[in-house]
């Protein structure tokens, strides 16, 4: 290779790398705003998925920013359970919203995880295609049902509903599927029923091809599925930060449930700024019916978790070695009725 | 051909009365929306950044490694099984490892892209060395070259055409893997656009818009690499 060719190639290669790195750093990493970069590093990150189960996470962040201008928490949005879980395991997110059975299973495997608060109650459903002739649990015999994850409470819910209808898990075919793919799968009739958190269930109803088989609130009242969990280390070393986090989550829960106007406001700012979804989805799911999903009454209670433990053992995802005291720490909110909602009302000006 | 394809696409969507699959018109509007929000440039730069670094690392490591392994048969026998074991493992399988090692940052997708690209390059280089014509070696030996000169002046130049082919393939693979690599909670990039559009409800127009952008940029990259083939140093290796 002549010197000039090699030289020119090297110059082009190095030049391109330098250019693209500069562009990326400037546009995507804000490297030239040193203050914001430094603040990014110190933030306490909380993982979440764009589902209503985790709604209190963005709401807390948004209202905090409105009230105080900035805060030490940074919500990090993931696109699937595996990435969310791995980021938690690697310590990138010291706190995260997570499926309760998944947190319990992680504890059984020795991961230092502690559930500190619930994320929500209810807020899930089983949907079928509106043209199908499935109207009761018994009609699902021999059919295919999609659930988000084997550690999801939706799977346990199906288990429980089968038990109540006198059927067993072998009477149906259970498949795991990421919640965002479920509406399309139902539309294409690739599966006969789907179950996950909102707003993916409501989406099928809104778009006209889905029908509710049952809402969880009608089958398992006060159903819990997602919880807020933190690293045990955080509780030991940064207890006040964790306390602030739980206080914030509790307050935003009360704020959301205070009035329908608050719920509609939530639908707007969460869809636009955090979930990147069409606001009509969250608007629908937070209002029809109004108690489709609830954000109060979120204290950790032993009977709720023992029920999950038992169903988990029966369905084979838990081995029963971890108990309520091992995987929860209920000391952060001792009296939920004393929690006051955020004192913030939306007005015309937004501080965004 | 392209016009025919687009017409067929639009017709197929209309005829199937599909509510979900976008028409070419939807996709164009989706692209326009991205440009309006200033996101398209951001995402393209982020993806190009990760692919550039991952691919460059793969070339810098893969080419010398391939040349050495191709030349020294003992080394080849020792390392080839390892290469053949790791090669078929999809980058998606490496995602958990990438997160644990590199956290949630640009380093993780760069690592995945590197992994995907380094194998085609190394294997091409090895094959090129092993298939080198003996006449070059004999001539080099006649001239009494040192090992360093042997590698730089003879082996590398003799293998260049095949190495460039390997690089073309690897660049295609790198760009292909960017969607998988950007599944790891990075918040920018064309792959991220596609995955996030799934979460956003019915935004399949954005999904296909992302695919279209990836395809177009892949085409441009390939054209650029093929310019390399025009140089004399490489052209001698091709008969047409």
Image: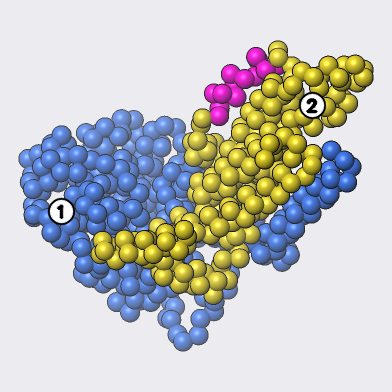
Chain colours: A blue, B yellow
- Horizontal side of A25 relative to A141 (left or right) equals right
Image coordinates for residue A82, horizontal then vertical, percent: 43, 43
The outermost residue toward the bottom is A348
Q: Tell me which segment is drawn in magenta.
A: B75-87
Image coordinates for residue B123, horizontal then vertical, percent: 63, 28
In space, the residues marked 2 and 1 are separated at their CA atoms by 73 Å
Q: Which mark is residue B155?
A: 2
Question: Disc 1 on helix, strand or loop?
Answer: helix
What's the residue at 54%, 46% (across, down)? B176
- Horizontal side of A75 relative to B132 (left or right) equals left
Q: Quadrant of the N terminus of chain A?
A: top right
Q: Nearer the viewer, residue B20 or A32?
A: B20
- Horizontal side of A231 relative to A152 (left or right) equals right
Q: Nearer the viewer, residue A109 or B99?
A: B99
Residue A287 sits in which quadrant? bottom left
What's the residue at 42%, 81% (across, down)? A345
Disc 1 sits on a residue from what chain? A
Disc 2 sits on a residue from what chain? B
Residue B223 in view of the camera: yes
Image coordinates for residue B211, horizontal then vertical, percent: 48, 56
Magenta-colored stretch includes residue B97: no
Q: Are marks 2 and 1 in contact (CB under 8 Å)?
A: no
Image coordinates for residue B224, horizontal then vertical, percent: 68, 52
Q: Which residue is mark 1?
A: A219
Q: Quadrant of the C terminus of chain A?
A: bottom right
Main SS of residues in magenta:
helix
Q: Nearer the viewer, residue A83 or A209?
A: A209
Residue B119 sits in which quadrant? top right
């Amino acid at each position: 290779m002549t010197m000039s060719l090699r030289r020119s190639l090297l110059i082009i290669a190095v030049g391109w790398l330098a250019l693209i790195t500069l562009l990326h750093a400037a546009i995507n990493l804000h490297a030239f705003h040193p203050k914001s970069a430094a603040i990014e590093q110190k933030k306490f990150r909380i993982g979440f998925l764009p589902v209503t189960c985790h709604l209190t996470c963005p709401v807390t962040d948004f209202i905090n920013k409105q009230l105080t201008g900035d805060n030490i928490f940074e919500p990090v949005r993931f696109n699937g359970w595996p990435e969310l879980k791995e980021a938690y395991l690697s310590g990138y997110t010291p706190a995260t919203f997570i499926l309760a059975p998944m947190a319990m299973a992680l504890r059984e495997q020795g991961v230092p995880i502690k559930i500190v608060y619930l994320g929500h109650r209810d807020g899930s459903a089983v949907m079928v295609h509106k043209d199908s002739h499935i109207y009761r649990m018994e009609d699902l015999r021999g059919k295919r049902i999609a659930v988000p994850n084997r550690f999801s409470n939706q799977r346990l819910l199906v288990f429980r509903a089968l038990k109540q209808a006198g059927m067993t898990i072998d009477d149906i075919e259970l498949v795991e599927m990421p919640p965002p793919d479920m509406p399309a799968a139902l539309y294409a009739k690739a599966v006969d029923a789907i179950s996950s958190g909102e707003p993916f269930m409501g989406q099928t109803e809104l778009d006209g091809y889905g029908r509710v088989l049952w809402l969880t609130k009608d089958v398992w009242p006060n159903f819990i599925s997602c919880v807020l969990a933190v690293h045990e280390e955080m509780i030991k070393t940064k207890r006040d930060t964790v306390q602030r986090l739980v206080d914030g989550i509790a307050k935003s829960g009360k704020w959301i449930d205070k009035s329908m106007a608050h719920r509609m406001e939530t639908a707007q700012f969460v869809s636009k700024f955090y979930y990147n979804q069409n606001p009509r989805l969250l608007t629908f799911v937070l209002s029809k019916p109004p108690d489709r999903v609830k954000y109060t009454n979120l204290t950790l209670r032993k009977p709720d978790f023992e029920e999950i433990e038992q169903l988990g053992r029966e369905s084979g995802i838990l081995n029963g070695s971890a108990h309520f005291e091992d995987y929860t720490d209920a000391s952060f909110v001792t009296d939920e009725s004393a929690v006051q909602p955020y004192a913030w009302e939306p007005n015309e000006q937004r501080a965004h | 051909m392209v016009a025919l394809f687009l017409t067929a696409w639009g017709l197929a969507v209309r005829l199937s009365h599909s509510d979900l699959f976008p028409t070419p018109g939807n996709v164009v509007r989706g692209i326009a929306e991205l440009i309006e929000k200033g996101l398209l440039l951001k995402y393209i730069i982020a993806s190009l950044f990760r692919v550039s670094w991952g691919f460059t690392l793969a070339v810098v490591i893969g080419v010398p490694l391939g040349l050495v392994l191709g030349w020294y048969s003992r080394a080849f026998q020792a390392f080839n099984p390892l290469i053949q074991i790791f090669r078929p493992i999809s980058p998606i399988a490496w995602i958990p490892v990438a997160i644990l090692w590199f956290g949630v940052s640009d380093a993780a997708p760069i690592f995945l892209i590197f992994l995907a690209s380094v194998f085609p390059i190394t294997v091409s280089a090895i094959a090129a060395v092993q298939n080198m014509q003996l006449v070059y070696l004999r001539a080099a030996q006649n001239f009494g070259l040192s090992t360093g000169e042997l590698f730089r002046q003879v082996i590398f130049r003799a293998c260049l055409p095949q190495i460039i082919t390997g690089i073309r393939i690897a660049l295609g693979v790198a760009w292909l893997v960017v969607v998988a690599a950007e599944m790891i909670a990075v918040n920018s990039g064309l792959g991220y656009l596609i995955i996030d559009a799934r979460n956003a409800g019915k935004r399949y127009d954005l999904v296909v818009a992302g695919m279209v952008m990836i395809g177009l940029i892949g085409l441009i990259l390939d054209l650029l690499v093929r310019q390399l083939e025009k140089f004399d140093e490489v052209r001698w290796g091709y008969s047409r």
